[in-house]
Image (cartoon, helix red, strand yellow):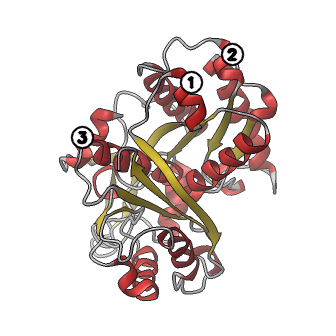
């Protein structure tokens, strides 16, 4: 993940033509491939849930290689919860009966992932958060509640998504959500797997581990006029989330914001409305758009934002000692969280 964060910070982007999916250009009526950001050589040959598993397992393997986590005994993981963030359960994409997609995700992804990790995380401490973009914020809130009520010392959050699926791409194309040569205001499909291990201060100190980054505040909420409602999103839900976090920070906030804007008009309009709602509270905040470099990574976007913010803060690249990560799902869930350097 360090290498990926460094590449994004350096502005490295390698979009490719998705030869397996093409759209008809309106003017020429020719079939043209859509550009996207597949992880070539790693997810090739896997479909939908298979790609999720591949991405999730790779993210956890990377995490387990880090000092302070590698080689931990079973007792460590028995005090750990597992929160798994996915896209919404879409029956159309999963070719399932009404309501069947959620059960399919549980049976074909959640349970196999839990088993494949080989970590001694108890089954009751495993939860699925299938709400897409804002899932990481919701998952971290869920983890906080578990640590407070169940005596857990840490929570492993795995956020994964991939738009490299033919049915999903057809669905996006039918709603004119893809960026193409004759439709420049759409998204570029991407894929990513990110895992976060969040631990209580008491547990970290007991283990002699000092984290460079702390999560200060997490706020979640809902936008009633979301994209899926067919109404104009005026950013009220997201603005309320951000305001809840900003209320605990000095005003105005001039730090860094990591957002999940992806090129779609509704997201740009939502963000513009948020700026109007919050006015001078946001000050001269600097906006980062990871989707510019890796495409829209859906349910993994919030966790990617957390990693990028932590990477920049820990290396002194942030404008201030605190950064924000904001997320908005197309079905209305919104979230905002603040990260801070521990020595600030």
Is residue 227 depicted above or below 143 in this figure? Answer: below
Residue shown at 50% from the left, 71% from the top = 242
User: Which of label 1 and label 3 is nearer to you?
Assistant: 1
Secondary structure category for the residue under label 3 = helix
Residue at image mark 3: 6
Depth order, front residue of 179/302: 302
The CA span between labels 2 and 3 is 34 Å
Q: Earlier in the sequence, mark 1 or mark 2?
A: 2
Residue shown at 27% from the left, 48% from the top = 15
Q: Which of marks 2 and 3 is nearer the N terminus?
A: 3
Left or right, 128 with respect to 256, comes to right
Neighbourhood count class around disc 2 (C-alpha, 10 Å): few under 14, some 14–19, many 20 upward: few
* Residue 163 visible (yes or no): no
Residue 83 placement (x, y as % from top left) = 66, 40
Tell me the quarter of the picture where residue 5 sits.
top left
User: Which of label 2 and label 3 is nearer to you?
Assistant: 2
Residue 156 placement (x, y as % from top left) = 59, 34
Depth order, front residue of 328/245: 245
Left or right, 196 with respect to 257, comes to right
Residue at image mark 2: 75
User: Which of label 1 and label 2 is nearer to you?
Assistant: 1
Secondary structure category for the residue under label 1 = helix
The CA span between labels 1 and 3 is 31 Å
Is residue 133 depicted above or below 211 in this figure? Answer: below
Label placed on residue 206 = 1
Neighbourhood count class around disc 3 (C-alpha, 10 Å): few under 14, some 14–19, many 20 upward: some
Neighbourhood count class around disc 1 (C-alpha, 10 Å): few under 14, some 14–19, many 20 upward: few
**Quadrant placement of the N terminus:** top left
Secondary structure category for the residue under label 2 = helix
Residue 279 placement (x, y as % from top left) = 39, 87
Left or right, 307 with respect to 335, comes to left
Residue shown at 44% from the left, 74% from the top = 267
């Amino acid at each position: 993940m360090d290498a990926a964060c460094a590449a994004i910070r350096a502005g490295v982007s390698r979009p490719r033509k998705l030869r397996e999916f093409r759209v008809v250009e309106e003017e020429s009526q020719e079939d043209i491939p859509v550009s996207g950001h597949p992880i070539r050589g790693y997810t090739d040959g896997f479909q939908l849930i298979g790609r999720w598993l591949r991405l999730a397992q790779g993210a956890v393997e990377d995490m387990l290689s880090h000092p302070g986590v590698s080689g931990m005994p079973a007792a460590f993981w028995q005090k750990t919860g597992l929160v798994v963030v996915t896209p919404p359960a879409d029956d159309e994409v999963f070719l399932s009966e009404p309501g069947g997609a959620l059960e399919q995700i549980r049976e074909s992804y959640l349970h196999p992932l839990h088993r494949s990790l080989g970590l001694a995380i108890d089954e009751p401490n495993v939860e699925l958060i299938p709400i897409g973009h804002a899932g990481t914020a919701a998952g971290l809130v869920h983890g906080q509640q578990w640590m407070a009520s169940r005596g857990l010392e840490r929570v492993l959050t795995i956020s994964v998504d991939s738009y490299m699926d033919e049915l999903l791409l057809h669905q996006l194309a039918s709603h004119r959500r893809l960026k193409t040569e004759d439709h420049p205001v759409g998204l570029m499909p991407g894929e990513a797997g990110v895992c976060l291990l969040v631990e209580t201060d008491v547990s970290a100190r007991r283990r002699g581990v000092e984290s460079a980054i702390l999560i200060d505040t997490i706020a979640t909420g809902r936008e009633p006029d979301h994209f899926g409602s067919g109404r104009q999103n005026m950013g009220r839900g997201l603005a309320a989330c951000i305001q809840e976090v900003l209320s605990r920070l000095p005003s105005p906030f001039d730090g860094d914001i990591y957002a999940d804007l992806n090129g779609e008009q509704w997201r740009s309009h939502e963000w513009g409305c948020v700026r109007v709602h919050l006015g001078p509270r946001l000050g001269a905040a600097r906006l980062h758009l990871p989707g510019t470099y890796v495409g829209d990574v859906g349910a993994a976007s919030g966790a990617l934002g957390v990693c990028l913010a932590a990477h920049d803060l820990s290396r002194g690249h942030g404008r201030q000692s605190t950064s924000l990560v904001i997320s908005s799902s197309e079905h209305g869930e919104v979230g905002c969280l603040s990260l801070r350097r521990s020595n600030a």
